[in-house]
Image: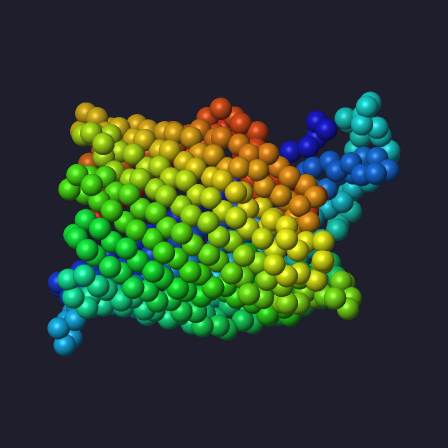
Amino acid sequence: MTRDKEETWVNIGTARLDHRFNDMFNLRNTLRFSHMDRDSAVTNPTAVLPDTLNRSRPQRSILDNQTDLTAKFDTFGFGHTATTGIELSRETFDFLRWASNGPNTTISNPNHHQLPAKTLAQNSYTTSTGFGIYVADQIRLNQYFDIVGGARWDYFGTEVNDKFLNDKRHQLDKMWSYRGGLVFHPTAAQSYYFSYGTSFNPSAEGVAFSVATNGTPPEKNEIFEVGAKIAFFDGALNLQSAVFRIDKTNARTPNPIDPTLPNVITGKQRSQGFEIGLVGRLVPGVNVFTGYTFLDTEVLKDNTAANIGKQIANVPEDSANLWITYDFLEKWQIGGGPSYVGSRFSNNANANRVPGFVRWDSTIAYQITKNIQLRLNAINLTNQLYFDSVGGSKAVPAAGRTFISSASFKF
């Protein structure tokens, strides 16, 4: 339809403060604010072929501040690199959606200029507040071995004011997460490690609070990883690789008694695979960043029996990237490369799939002074049609050819 459109405005600002008190203590504070305004009008055909236009105007704002204090010290002959910090965040989501139904039309001979009446279909305002406090320590036992341990406590509260349904809902999640590991350094250029960690996904994460997730506890994850990091040519080239398994031990799944009730957390999902990456400078001025990831996913347990044994939605089996930059004339940098994402299913039933794609990006930068840099990034240079996200029976096309200019200042 000629009236269809999607316009998005994104503004992001970041301020970072680094202060080194002495050789022992270093403080870093990062403050970031972002605001996104999206105006969308999309025609949705259905089985009876009405000319239906859904128009939405969501606005999302995120304010996040993270403070880290790093300390290096020795106790009883063991070297410590300890980090502790606090993270504060506030996210808002203001969502308006209108639905309009016009006279019926046909796909073979549509009327592009019908102007149906507009009616309000959704009007809600959601606010999420997060607070996290954490501590981690890497302890050097001797020349060959380090142990790593850490813990984090999170508070995540979400409140939605649904003005259309005249309804208010609130959810509060509080949870601990942990990580630990062992690192082996046979030489200065080699590191091999094993790590274990936990994490969680609140049901209202991403400020997505719905009837299906109302009151549903967080999902819990366990992460196992074995990997290696090897440096070549005195550190000019670095290879890293890992084999991992992520188990979601209590995945959200429909209520077995009544699917219209909020989800229950009785499912189980697994994602396992490996990744390999190469970063370094092959010759003076030429920097290379490349990697490949393989993911094998499976729904192990679900209240929808047809989903068991299927792949997890929106997760590609294969993805890869290559990025090369060249520094020249002391102040200039130019670069680019492709990124590949394989095909993905839109739901855990694996009923619909979107194809994989290759996207080409590039960059050019000019270093005005030691502390000031200008950069222009071009994303999706070939204007490739691909899908940024999929879910259920819908696939959302990604942005076309995009240019982003930025300026960075250090002081």
**Residue at position x 34%, y 47% in the image:** 241
| Left or right of 97 on screen, residue 32 | left
Number of labels in the image equals 0
| Left or right of 373 on screen, residue 197 | right
Give whichever of 131, 231 is nearer the camera.
Answer: 231
Give whichever of 273, 172 is nearer the camera.
Answer: 273
**Residue at position x 53%, y 37% in the image:** 342
- Which quadrant would residue 115 be assigned to in this image? top right
- Which quadrant would residue 364 be assigned to in this image? top left
On screen, residue 130 above or below 309: below
**Residue at position x 70%, y 27% in the image:** 2
| Left or right of 360 on screen, residue 41 | right
Q: Position of residue 144 (x, y in %)?
A: 18, 61
Give whichever of 124, 308 is nearer the camera.
Answer: 308
Q: Position of residue 257 (x, y in %)?
A: 77, 68
**Residue 85 visible in the current orientation:** no
Q: Position of residue 279 (x, y in %)?
A: 29, 40
| Left or right of 69 on screen, residue 321 | right
Q: Which colour scheme is used?
A: rainbow
Q: Where is residue 388 in the image (x, y as percent from the top left)?
A: 56, 39
Image quarter (top left, top right, bottom left or bottom right) of the N terminus: top right
**Residue 22 visible in the current orientation:** yes
